[in-house]
Image: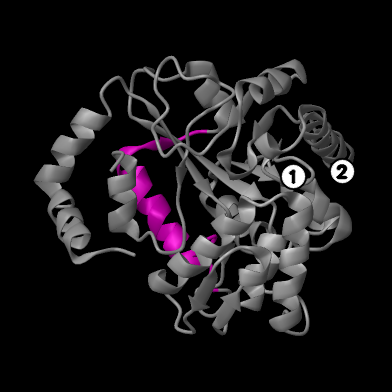
Amino acid sequence: MITTAKRAARAVLGIPPVLGLLRSWRLRGNPVTVLCYHTIGPDTGGPDAWTVLRAADFRAHLAALQESHDIVDLDRALADGPGHRGRPRAVLTFDDGEAGNHRYLLPILTELQLPVTIFVATGQIETGQPYWFDRIMGALTAGADVDLATHGLGRWHIPPTPGPSRWATVSSLLETLKRTAPDCRAAIVDDILSRYPLPPGRPPLGPMTRAELAEIARSPRVTIGAHSHCHNLLDQLPLVEAEASIARSRSLLRDWTGQEVAHFAWPNGNHTPALRQRAQRLGFRSAAALDMRLWRAGADPYALPRLGIGRHDDTARLRLRLVGT
């Protein structure tokens, strides 16, 4: 939750002269800014989840970003590297492969002619079923009291009113579930959904179909990357199992899109030296993390830092993120 002190600090940092000084300092050495989004939703309605940015807000983000940065594709950024002369550069990435990428993101990219990399988790595409975290977010949209004491976990009161405070509680629940073993987590998720079932019809969040994925992959502005098959935290799995999930996602994406798949993103940003070595051995040119840092010279290409951006980040907050605050 954002405190009054934090709001005041952000207001001061957002004053143009102060922001300009911050930008000059933080962008020394001309690092690359890699932004991590998840999906785009409608301007009104839609699921109240941090991962779903309204289309109008995304357009505002792009306008603010282009005030100070050139938006380039990931391959260009890797070829040039940090320190390249000229305007600061930014790379747009999206994780998971949610249907909003096709429905809302693709038309914006086509209109504005901007490049993006979409890291697709293939398990949900293959089955047509959303992953557990999207099912939980969809089930708790009306608020809930989630008591997981019988599972050795805590209790969460999910407010019914949309907004950052509600999301902070949902996020706390999701982070707790992420830390549980996959088999145990599946049972806990089933328990929650038995008490708070998904609304009828298509869930508020769900994957692209294979046809939608194939269409978005045909766009000259879109690079498809792999995001594992299982979308589990790969550092929690045996190394051989994690590698198999990485390799399977790449193989499926090649089959479904007919394209080379050269880039990977770690689910939740979790990686280890051994996992990074496996990604390199599999032939990926890069693997993206989530370190909330700018990409500076000397960064490991298999742990590229990204800034996570979500529904409750307005353009003022985005400008501060761009200078690493």
Label whose residue precedes the other's in the sequence (2 or 1): 1
Mark 2 burial class by Cα count in 10 Å: few <14, some 14-19, many 20+: some
Q: Which residue is found at the position 54% from the left and 82% from the top?
A: 143
Q: Is residue 274 left or right of residue 248?
A: left
For marks 2 and 1, give the one nearer the viewer: 2
282, above or below 217, in the image = above
Q: Quadrant of residue 266?
A: top right
Q: Which residue is mark 1?
A: 217
Give the secondary structure at mark 1. helix
- Give the residue type that dot 2 points to: Trp
Residue type of the residue flagged with mark 1: Ala
Q: Measured from the top left, where is residue 191 in percent x and y? A: 74, 73
- Rendering coords of residue 54 (x, y %): 49, 67
Indicate yes or no whether the magenta region holds residue 255.
no
The region drawn magenta spans 48-72
Give the position of the C terminus as an image quadrant: top left
| Percent coordinates x, y for residue 50 in the rendering | 50, 63
Q: Residue at x 76, y 79 (%)?
A: 194
Task: Give the quadrant of residue 124.
Answer: bottom right
Determine which quarter of the picture holds residue 23.
top left
- Residue drawn at point x = 36 percent, y = 46 percent: 65
Label 1: how many Cα within 10 Å (few below 14, some 14–19, many 20+) = many
Secondary structure of the residue carrying tag 2 is: helix
Please say if the residues under marks 2 and 1 sit with CB atoms less than 8 Å apart. yes
Residue at far left of view: 17
Residue 63 visible somewhere in the drawing: yes
Residue 131 in view in this figure: no
Identify the disc placed on residue 256.
2
**Magenta stretch encompasses residue 54:** yes
Q: Say which of 146 and 26 sits in front.
A: 146
